[in-house]
Image (tube, rainbow, N blue to C red):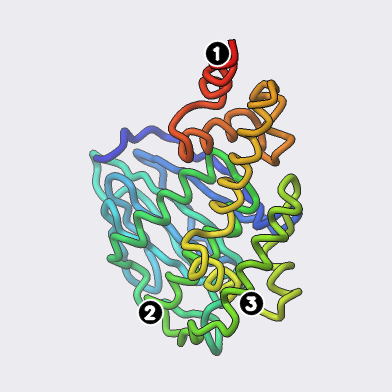
Amino acid sequence: MGEQVVEQALWTRARLGRCGPPLDLLTASFRRHVYAPHAHEEYTVGVCVGGSEVIDYRGGHIRTGPGTIVVLDPGEMHTGGPGDTSGGYAYRALYAEPSLLADGTLGDLPYFREPLLDDPELAAALRLAHTDLSACPDPLEAESRLPWLLTALARRHSTARPVSDLIPGAGMIALTVRDRLADELTAPPTLSSLAADLGLSRYQLLRAFRTTMGIPPYAWLAQYRVTRARALLDSGLRPAEVAPLVGFADQAHLTRWFRRVLGVTPAAYRNSVQDSRA
């Protein structure tokens, strides 16, 4: 198995944008646990990360394996338990309000005829986003990543028809969003509110931004925050003081992005700057 299985279920609640709606993330690993029959109001989207689970669903049985995606439609009764007597099962799951999967599609809510999906690229992206947001559920990051991936899931694997990806004025849209994020870096607006102001869906806004800037909004803002943090560190402030001034949740959040962008920790950067002035 990819991960050691112990009997545990850990929940994290992310928000889709500051003051936005919640989305629950579950990190689960079980050796013997069997779920009672139940249903969810949301879409259940899971990625198996170890072992095998057998799910009773629509009168049949689904058997997961590492890297497979399972999508259960809202209101569908199901159970789940270990696929064999030795290995147990481990998975990452999120519970998505139905409209999140319909943002980039036409017609009725997406319907998944096949609940078990083989899509390694999307499975890896879902697992990575789940892991990152479980560790640090940053609202703008959650709103930038999860709706985008859920829309991809619906467009690739459901019965729904995709909307057009042609966004007129994409460059100007991206620059407008960029400027708003820069102006409000410590408390950025939600992407859904920005989209509404521009007469767009959130998917259209994300599409325009990613096409123009090459990265999603949260990644652009994080890099902009690092640039601002660098100037404050240059002035002599400590990393713990700088983090909230540029909108990071805490020093650990600042450190993670500072290393991604500049290759060193904020403390090491500050020390090197101070040493050069000695």
**One can see residue 150 in this view:** yes
Task: Look at the numbered disc 1 and give the secondary structure of its residue.
Answer: helix
Residue 190 x/y as whole percent: 71, 60
Q: In the rendered image, which residue does mark 2 sit on?
A: 113
Q: Amino acid at mark 2?
A: Arg
Question: How far is the residue under mark 2 from the one under mark 3?
Answer: 26 Å
Task: Look at the numbered disc 2 and give the secondary structure of its residue.
Answer: loop
Query: What residue sits 49% from the left and 71% below the top?
Result: 151
Q: Is residue 18 above or below residue 262?
A: below
Which quadrant of the rendered structure holds the C terminus?
top right
Q: How many marks?
A: 3
Query: Residue most toward the top?
Result: 278
In this image, 265 relative to 227: left or right? Answer: left
**One can see residue 75 in this view:** no
Q: In the rendered image, which residue does mark 1 sit on?
A: 275
Q: Earlier in the sequence, mark 2 or mark 3?
A: 2
* For discs 2 and 1, the disc positioned in front in the rendered view: 1
Badge 3 vs badge 1, beta-carbon distance below 8 Å: no
Q: Earlier in the sequence, mark 3 or mark 1?
A: 3
